């Protein structure tokens, strides 16, 4: 049982680096923040709608934004959803934090599960719910794939999946997603599928759990919800535009709950978000695809997923490895132990491939020389 909030990984990193002065110009490969310019049409839409700041935004979002997101889902996943099957959100982090509180409220024994290591907001939501937690270990011997025992499946009420995964890059196949849908229906728990990295891939796009749901004959998406955002695909994390889509009955109640949360999206941001969801992200995808291929060539002995923009690299003592690289080369990496609990993530570092390819190639080549030392 979790008992207290922990500081975020980046605060822990600041403490780890305290007193160290890097000898080289700093390259920050710790955070999944794209180092590319937000496309101009998105910036232009934001700037040209500042007059809308005089109006209160609706908690449910404007119809034009919802339509743009529904169009994205149709074009990307070949799924036709109704407006009642989607809610525009202020990014996805707020959903990952407040949805469990909404959904598990009133449960006498709230219980949720999520991968380990993980995006720390999962843990924060569990703490806020005072929920019992089943951590699903992501390890080399299970191909970094999450799973639950039969006993856990019988007890859990909410399962967070993350595919493509942060930090490992592991991605659930369509068959694996279908199995999770079958389990959710059999044991009557809800899946919240975090798919924010779905647009970062080399060649073949990953699947959504909504597609798996349809293939299982679960056409009304009972117990199935998917999250997505434009932060990575559009290099616009500051825009805070996402959605939650799937089970209409759950979303109807959740929509009412959201009217109390104070997380309505400002109208100028909605106008810019509409443009972002309509724009192609192919140029950005190609950049990340090149970076992933560079990483695979440099770390030829390490299995590197063709999805997400993270490299999950085994280095031994990850704390000393990160301190050494920061001091001698100015390269900032994130220790894997900062992203996991119960020892998971130890011995690994997470590398974010968020710069242009020439910078990434130089940084990864340098990292490899220290890996051999």
Image (cartoon, helix red, strand yellow):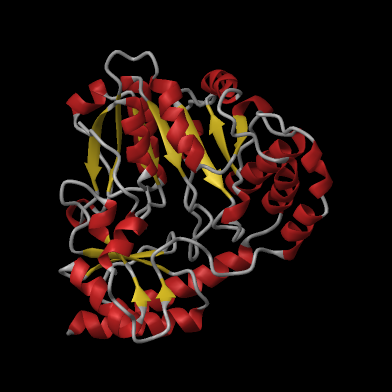
Residue at the spot x=42%, y=83% of the render? 25
Q: Position of residue 78 (x, y in %)?
A: 61, 43
Specify whether 127 is left or right of 356. left
Residue 196 visible to the viewer: yes
Is residue 205 depicted above or below 217 in this figure? Answer: below
Q: Quadrant of the C terminus?
A: bottom left
Q: Position of residue 331 (x, y in %)?
A: 36, 77
Specify whether 309 is left or right of 188. right
Splitting the image into 4 quarters, where does residue 26 fall? bottom left
Q: Position of residue 190 (x, y in %)?
A: 40, 26
Is residue 209 depicted above or below 300 in this figure? Answer: above
Splitting the image into 4 quarters, where does residue 236 fall? bottom right
**Residue at the front extreme of this rendering:** 19
Q: Nearer the viewer, residue 82 or 359?
A: 359
Residue at the spot x=57%, y=23% of the render? 260
Q: Nearer the viewer, residue 162 or 340?
A: 340
Q: Quadrant of the N terminus?
A: top left
Q: Position of residue 336 (x, y in %)?
A: 26, 59
Q: Nearer the viewer, residue 118 or 143?
A: 118
Specify whether 218 is left or right of 233. left
Give the total of numbered labels.
0
Residue at the spot x=35%, y=51% of the render? 8
Residue at the spot x=69%, y=36% of the render? 66
Residue 216 visible to the viewer: no
């Amino acid at each position: 049982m979790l008992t207290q909030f922990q500081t975020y990984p980046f605060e822990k990193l600041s403490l780890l680096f305290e007193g160290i002065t890097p000898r080289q110009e700093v390259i920050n490969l710790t955070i999944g923040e794209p180092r590319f310019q937000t496309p101009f049409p998105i910036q232009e839409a934001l700037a040209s709608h500042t007059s809308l700041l005089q109006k209160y935004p609706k908690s449910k979002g404007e119809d034009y934004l919802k339509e743009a997101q529904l169009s994205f889902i149709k074009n990307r996943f070949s799924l036709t959803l109704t407006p009642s099957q989607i809610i525009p959100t202020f990014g996805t982090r707020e959903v990952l934090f407040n949805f469990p509180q909404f959904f598990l409220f009133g449960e006498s024994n709230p219980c949720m599960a999520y991968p380990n290591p993980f995006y720390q907001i999962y843990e924060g939501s569990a703490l806020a719910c005072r929920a019992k937690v089943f951590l699903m270990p992501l390890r080399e011997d299970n191909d970094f794939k999450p799973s639950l025992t039969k006993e856990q499946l019988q007890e859990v009420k909410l399962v967070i999946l993350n595919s493509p995964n942060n930090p490992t890059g592991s991605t659930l196949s369509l068959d694996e997603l279908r199995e999770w849908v079958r389990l959710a229906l059999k044991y009557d728990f809800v899946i919240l599928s975090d798919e924010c990295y779905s647009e970062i891939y080399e060649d073949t796009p990953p699947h959504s759990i909504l597609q798996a749901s349809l293939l299982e004959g679960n056409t009304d998406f009972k117990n199935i919800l998917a999250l997505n955002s434009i932060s990575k695909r559009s290099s616009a994390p500051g825009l805070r535009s996402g959605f939650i889509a799937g089970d209409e009955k759950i979303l109807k109640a959740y929509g009412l709950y959201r009217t109390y949360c104070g997380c309505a999206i400002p109208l100028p941001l909605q106008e810019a978000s509409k443009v972002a969801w309509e724009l192609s992200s192919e140029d950005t995808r190609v950049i990340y695809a090149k970076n992933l291929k560079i990483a695979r060539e440099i770390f030829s002995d390490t299995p590197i997923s063709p999805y997400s923009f993270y490299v999950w690299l085994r280095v031994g003592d990850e704390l000393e490895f990160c301190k050494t690289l920061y001091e001698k080369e100015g390269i900032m990496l994130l220790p894997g132990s900062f992203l996991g609990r119960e020892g998971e993530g130890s011995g690994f570092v997470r590398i974010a491939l968020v710069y242009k390819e020439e910078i990434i190639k130089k940084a990864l080549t340098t990292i490899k020389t220290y890996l051999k030392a």
